[in-house]
């Protein structure tokens, strides 16, 4: 789920950081540029792990800042297909679930990847939002925000930035994770304690 990725980047250092030791100044600028950003096919940048080398420091004509070539290591979040991850429910609608890890919210479980059989109950004032239920052994088990939810990663994608987003579209997400709950042991963890008790009875 978390990886170390080595990167080389050409970095102009703003003049207001020049009073700091060079290593500290570049570390601050790297954090400003990369933290909480998604790099396509690499993942979400979590932190700057270390700086391996700093070269340059040249000031080019018409520029007021020195430019460095920096090799550094990032900690990135990039789950692999088939990985099992624990999350919390962020929202639920007629299309499926949206889950969150706390630091990453663009995880979607479409309705066809929920356990079968299932059903959706809309809210009284908004039929598109509501709660999904797994129907098992003549009982209905809800998927709500009171429990830890385990899901399997189905895919990780990096959508291109739209030139003109369609009206009423969801906010653009540079990295999307599609998950599934349709396998034994997945879903709210309380399900499996409850179903084991029912089977024992």
Image (tube, helix red, strand yellow):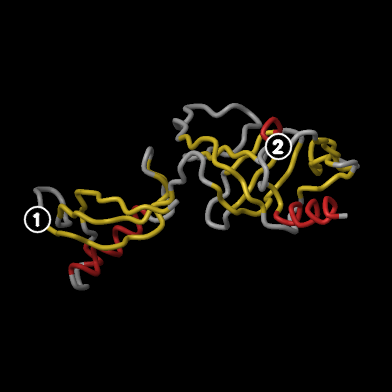
Q: Tell me, for residue 114, which label it has, or none.
A: 2
Residue at the farthest bottom position = 20
Q: Is residue 183 left or right of residue 21?
A: right
Q: Does 115 sit above or below residue 26?
A: above
Q: As rendered, which of 167 and 38 lies closer to the eye?
A: 38
Label 1: which secondary element = strand
Q: How packed is label 2: few (under 14 Cα within 10 Å), some, or many (20 or more)? A: many
Give the answer, above or below, for where 172 lies relative to 143. above
- Residue 200 location, x and y as percent? 83, 54
Residue 198, image x, y percentages: 85, 52
**Nearer to the camera, 142 or 128:** 142
Tell me if residue 20 comes above or below residue 200 in the rendering.
below
- Quarter of the picture holding the C terminus: bottom right
What x and y, as percent, mark residue 4?
32, 54
Give the residue pinned by disc 1: 56
Say whether disc 2 or disc 1 marks the residue closer to the N-terminus.
1
Q: Residues within 10 Å of mark 1 (few under 14, many from 20)?
A: few
- Residue 176 position, x and y percent, is 52, 39
Side of 125 where 186 appears, left or right: left
């Amino acid at each position: 789920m978390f990886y170390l990725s080595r990167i080389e980047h050409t970095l102009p250092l703003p003049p207001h950081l020049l009073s700091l030791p060079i290593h500290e100044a570049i570390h601050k600028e790297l954090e400003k540029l990369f933290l909480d950003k998604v790099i396509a096919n690499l993942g979400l940048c979590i932190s700057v792990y270390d700086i391996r080398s700093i070269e340059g420091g040249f000031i080019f004509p018409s520029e007021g800042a020195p430019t460095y070539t920096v090799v550094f290591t990032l900690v990135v979040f990039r789950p692999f297909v088939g990985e099992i991850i624990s999350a919390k429910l962020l929202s639920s609608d007629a299309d499926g679930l949206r889950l969150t890890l706390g630091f990453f919210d663009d995880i979607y479980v479409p309705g066809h990847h929920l356990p079968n059989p299932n059903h959706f109950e809309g809210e009284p004032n908004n039929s598109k939002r509501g709660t999904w239920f797994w129907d098992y052994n003549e009982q209905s088990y809800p998927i709500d925000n009171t429990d830890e939810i385990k899901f399997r990663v189905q895919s990780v994608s990096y959508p291109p930035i739209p030139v003109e987003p369609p009206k009423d579209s969801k906010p653009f997400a540079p990295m999307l994770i599609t998950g599934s709950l349709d396998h034994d042991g997945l879903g709210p963890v309380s399900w499996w304690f409850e179903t084991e008790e029912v089977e024992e009875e």
